[in-house]
Amino acid sequence: MITPEKAWVRRGSGRRHAFDRQTVVEEAMKLFWERGYEGTSFVDLIAAMGISASTFYNSFGSKEQLFIEAVHHYITGPGGERVTKIFSAPHDTCTAFELLLEAAAFDFTNSNYPAGCMISLAGTHVPPDQRSVRDAMVKFRANFEHMLKDRLRRGVEAGDLAPDTDVTELASFFGTVFRGMAVQARDGKSRKHLRGLAKIAMRAWPA
């Protein structure tokens, strides 16, 4: 997705006005994260982003297009970079998953952002005419599990895990743990509580 640092829109006078696209998408991301897709109104979006209705449509096209861009912004932000860094580091597989759960406990309770995870429950309850939003979020969640599965497969190849390890089920299990931690954070549970859940989850690690 192309997200230029500066976006340009024309005003009625014909003059071009620059705004920082990353900044306004960040504000939209926070609002979608806090309220969900359906719960975020167009009026609230343009107010949070500090742009006019015409600028919104000229720059983002529609609420759905903006939402998808906001999700991309979320997964390519610090949290997403952290996942990539952890999985690309020379840790054994068990340590990589321990670090990932620790990072989730931090990110889901980071006071700079809404609690929990933007993607975990997004788009699970939408009317039929917004099925495309639901389908997009299903793919985002599946992509995360694919990342987990790929790292587990590498662990099998490296000898960290037994050759008969069911990497698909293990990836699904940890994906469920991450989503559960996100819901717990959303319900106000502390970072300490999430870390405790992470430790319990690691007890399921194959011997």
Image: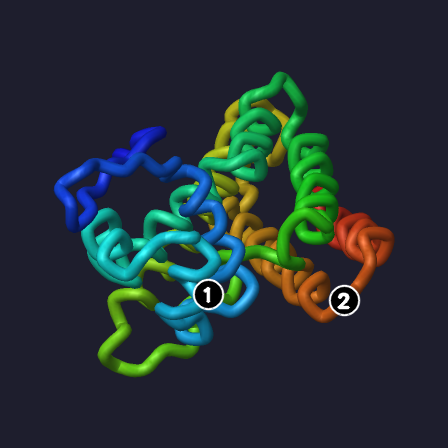
Q: Quadrant of the N terminus?
A: top left
Q: Position of residue 183 (x, y in %)?
A: 65, 66
The reply, left or right, for residue 62 in relation to residue 100 is left
Q: Name the residue: 46% across, 65% down.
A: 122
Circle 1: residue type: Ala
Q: Name the residue: 84% across, 58% down.
A: 193
Helix, strand or loop at mark 2: loop
Give me the disc on residue 188.
2
Q: How is the model colour-coded?
A: rainbow
Q: Position of residue 62 (x, y in %)?
A: 24, 60
Q: Name the residue: 47% across, 42% down.
A: 75
Residue sitting farthest toward the front = 13
Circle 2: residue type: Gly
Give me the disc on residue 122.
1
Asked if the residue under mark 2 is in contact with the one under mark 1, i.e. CB atoms within 8 Å, the reply is no
Asked if residue 37 is positioned above or below residue 179 in the image, the reply reads below
Crowding near pointer 1: few (<14 within 10 Å), some, many (20+)? many
Crowding near pointer 2: few (<14 within 10 Å), some, many (20+)? few
Residue sitting farthest toward the top = 90
Frontmost residue, 189 versus 60: 60
Give me the disc on residue 8.
none
Q: Position of residue 28 (x, y in %)?
A: 44, 54
Q: Is residue 91 visible?
A: yes
The reply, left or right, for residue 161 in relation to residue 29 is right
Residue sitting farthest toward the left = 14
Q: Quadrant of the C terminus?
A: top right
Place residue 179 in its image quadrant.
bottom right
